[in-house]
Amino acid sequence: MIGDRVEIVVDAGGTTRSWDVEATRAGRRVEIAHGRGVVEVSEVTRGGTPVRTARFMSSRVLALVEHPASATVRLADDEPPVLPLPRPA
C-alpha cells in the first residue's frame, strides 16, 4: 500500500547511515528478505516484480524499522471504504 516504508540503519565505520525504501505508488508494497549474510529490502508491484532493491551486509545492519501506511491514506484504486448497512424502517 502506498506509504509503506522501511528504514534501514547501517554501521558505516564509526558513524551510522540511514536509508528509506518506500512504496511510492498505490498497490506496491515493501518486502524484506535476508539470507547468506545479505539483507535485501525491495519495493514490489502487485504482480511481484521488484521495482527498486537495496542490499546491505547483515553484519553491518543495526536496525530495520518498518513504518506501515496509515489507514487514512487511500487512493482511487485502493479498496473502497466499508459503508454501514441501512437500518430497516
Image (cartoon, rainbow, N blue to C red):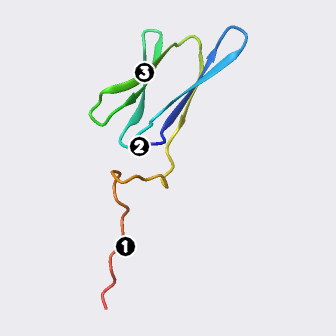
Tally the marks.
Answer: 3
User: Which of the two residues, 61 or 55, is positioned nearer the viewer here?
Assistant: 55
Q: Callout 3: helix, strand or loop? A: strand
Image position of 11 (left or right of 31):
right
For image coordinates 56% across by 10% down, the residue present is 59
In the displayed structure image, the side of residue 53 where residue 62 appears, left or right: right
Question: If you read the primary sequence from the N terminus, does the residue marked by circle 1 or circle 3 appear first?
Answer: 3
Residue at label 2?
1
How many C-alpha atoms fall within 10 Å of the one at disc 1: few (<14), some, or many (≥20)? few
Residue at mark 1: 84
Q: Residue at x 48, y 39 (%)?
A: 4
- Frontmost of labels 1 and 3 is 3
- Looking at the rendered structure, the kind of residue marked 2 is Met
Q: Are marks 1 and 3 in contact (CB under 8 Å)?
A: no
Q: Residue furthest bottom?
A: 89
Measure how far apart labels 1 and 3 are at the Cα level: 41 Å
Q: Residue furthest left?
A: 47
Specify the quadrant of the image occupied by residue 35.
top left
Front position in the image: 85 or 5: 5
Q: Quadrant of the C terminus?
A: bottom left
**Where residue 11 appears, x then y in whole percent?**
65, 14
**Contact, CB < 8 Å: mark 3 with mark 2?**
no
In-front residue for pair 18/75 = 75
For badge 1, the amino acid type reads Pro
Say whether disc 3 or disc 2 marks the residue closer to the N-terminus: 2
Q: Which mark is residue 53?
A: 3
Vertical arrangement, residue 80 with respect to residue 9, above or below: below
Q: For residue 46, which quarter of the picture?
A: top left
Question: Residue 44 occupies which quadrant of the picture?
Answer: top left
Residue 56: assigned label? none
Relative to 76, residue 34 above or below: above
